[in-house]
Image (cartoon, rainbow, N blue to C red):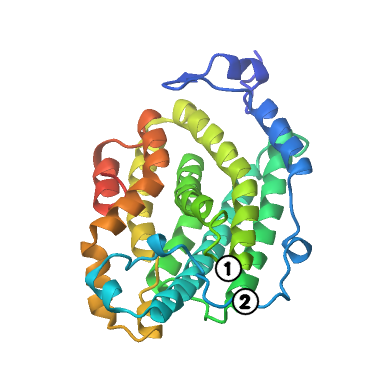
Amino acid sequence: MTSAPTEMTVTDTDVLRDALGLLKDREQVAERLLDSSAKHSFDPDTELDWDAPLEEGKWFWPPELVSLYDTPLWKKMSPEQQQDLSRHEAASLASLGIWFEIILMQLLVRHIYDKPVTSAHVRYALTEIADECRHSKMFARMIQKGGAPAYPVSRLNHNLARVLKTVSTTPGSFACTLLGEEILDWMQRLTFPDERVQTIVRGVTRIHVVEEARHVRYAREELRRQMVTAPRWERELTRISSGEAARVFSVAFVNPAVYTQVGLDRREAVAQVRASGHRREVMQSGARRLTDFLDEIGVLRGVGRRLWRSSGLLA
């Protein structure tokens, strides 16, 4: 009697199906992503003009995406103070991005540890890790260029992520990956064509959008596969862990220290952001494509769905 194979074969993928239809072959997906990476990858150190001066009177983030936009406090702020808040929020989001990408790189390394090293699936994961290394360096340079400080997440969230990196299952890792990538991607797609925004910020977001599209495709395809093949306990854990990650992510999205930096009362600013219908709509719009996808493949169920609702990312 021969033992069961430990790796899914090409023919196995032909019969895997979920609510979205047949799953594509894992190796074929990876090969296409590798081809795209070869054609559309960027070195931010040479692609962007880091020596060009910042432009007077331009935003660092579209005003409609700044957390306090359209609140009573926003309407009392001077245009200069509003733009300065956009500078600090851009630095806060870049800091969050670096934190998240460092987590993602470790999760990807864990994912491929037991996979065949010559497979296209592993080769693409290594390519994505290289992308994320460049992105993290790019975000750090953008923070320095803007002259704002870096904004680390709270010590609690920093250590919660340390636990996540250690215990996360494969489907949980990819669900969290999409949470971190897709909302920021939606915002950046509004940012890079916006001529009101600093040229360097537009360049950073353009590179990130092009390369993250591949990362999202890789994560979506793998999460679909995992939600079909993982044991029931792992699917249930993924629902809960992704909901808790959504709650933490929504809280950490903008560091409240940015309000102090521009001379605002932190408590009042945080309260107005929480009460803002515009901000709620921005966050839910940014998450909608993701939550629709997660709902279709069975992630948004039970306790996990309630956690997603409590995060404010799911209407």
In the displayed structure, does residue 201 sit left or right of residue 290? right
* Residue 93 picture location, percent across and down: 48, 66
Residue ID for mark 1:
198
Q: Considering depth in this image, is 253 or 142 the residue closer to the camera?
A: 142
* Residue 176 picture location, percent across and down: 46, 48
Decide which of tag 1 and tag 2 comes sooner along the chain: 2
Mark 1: amino acid: Gln
- Marks 1 and 2, how far apart at CA: 7 Å
Few, some or many C-alpha atoms within 10 Å of disc 1 (few <14, some 14-19, many ≥20)? Answer: many
Residue appearing at x 31%, y 83% in the figure? 264
Q: Is residue 152 visible?
A: no
Look at the numbered discs 1 and 2 and tell me whether their residues touch, using CB distance below 8 Å: yes
Residue appearing at x 48%, y 39% in the figure? 171
* Residue 79 picture location, percent across and down: 39, 77
Number of dots carrying numbers: 2
- Above or below — where is 196 with respect to 155? above
In the displayed structure, does residue 245 sit left or right of residue 278? right
**Quadrant of the drawing holding the C terminus:** top left
Q: Determine whether the residue tagged by mark 1 lies in a helix, strand or loop.
A: loop
In the displayed structure, does residue 128 sit left or right of residue 280? right
Q: Considering depth in this image, is 280 or 10 the residue closer to the camera?
A: 280
